[in-house]
Amino acid sequence: MHKVNVSVPAVSTNIGPGLDILGLALNLRNVVEMSLTNDDHLRVEVRGEGSGVLPENVHNPVMAAAIRLFQALEQAPAGLHVRCANDIPLDAGLGARTALIVGGLVGANNLLGGPFQREDLIDLAAELSGEPAAVVTAMRGGLGVCAEGPDTLLYRSVEVTPLRVVVALPLLPDYQPRLRDALPRQVPLRDAVHNAGHTALLIEALRGGDYRLLRHAVTDRLHEPYRRTFIPGYDAVVAAAAEAGAVAVTLCGAGPALMAFATFNHQSIESAMHGAFRSAGVEARTWSLGVDQQGVVISVVE
């Protein structure tokens, strides 16, 4: 095999109470085209989201991941050409960089004939990205659930009922450095218990399409109360989405994107969230997206 395309979905992790545990795959994708060449050059092209920001050299997440896989096999290609066609916005809470790492590993593995199993690639991608929930979900689609075991990563994928969400991304250039710094190192036991119970109920709500339960199950006490203070207009946007028909609103990953669950009226919810952000003095981008059930999709080009 000389060329392969790898399509990887966006992932919204946490989904309220499932901090570092849950991920939901969304139909917004990065596509990595990777090909072996006969020269000794490592070339990267970036189109779409991240163009002009992501490096076009060995430090690009796709190329770095591919090189890591080659090193694990003690092999090296004569040359490698990577094209990234990105639809997932960077630093939004939608797993864009993780998607690129997954694309790089899966692409390189397929070019070499598939020496690693999917489970091996999940472990390697989790190590490289530091985002195991996003990796599991991107690879397998649907709702990903993961936790650290004594000596390995434990995970399962849960098929959820078909649903659409609205994602609103406020343009906040200074938000990224605040991701982990805003969170407390210790939390009250009652808050930990709250999140454990709500995470279990949230999984059931998504699996069974129980929107009544979903409305209450997404509440979080461990990260959203701290992160939302850095998002201008957060409360107004949540209220506007609810008035337009949203069942619940939660942060995408660490933010600053917000995700609204709804059974109908998605276009009106998009407009309402966009308008509420604009009233707070913040421009925003919005999408209406279905939940992805496929995960990584591989196609052989040549």
Image (spheres, rainbow, N blue to C red):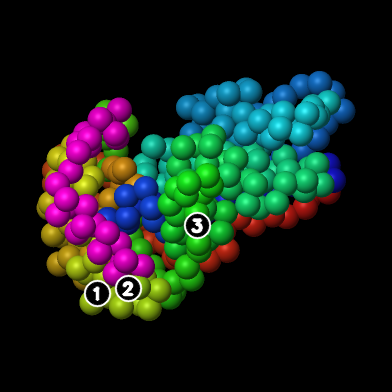
Are the residues at dot 1 and dot 2 in contact (C-beta closer than 8 Å)?
A: yes
Mark 2 to mark 3 CA distance (whole Å): 19 Å
Using the rendered image of the protein, determine whether residue 86 is visible from the camera's viewpoint.
no
Closer to the camera in the image, 40 or 156: 156
Element type at mark 1: helix
Mark 3, other Cα within 10 Å: few <14 / some 14–19 / many ≥20: some
Question: Residue 279's x, y, as percent?
Answer: 13, 46
Q: In the drawing, does residue 50 fall left or right of residue 300?
A: left
Element type at mark 2: helix
Q: Is residue 12 above or below residue 255?
A: below
The secondary structure that dominates the magenta segment is helix
Q: Which residue is mark 3?
A: 155
| Residues rendered magenta in the picture | 177-203
Type of amino acid under label 1: Leu
Are the residues at dot 1 and dot 3 in contact (C-beta closer than 8 Å)?
A: no
Number of residue marks? 3
Q: Which residue is mark 1?
A: 213
Q: Looking at the image, which residue sits at the far right?
A: 38
Determine which of the numbered discs, if any, sits on residue 205 in the image: 2
Question: Residue 122's x, y, as percent?
Answer: 58, 47
Residue beneath the point at 18% across and 43% down: 187
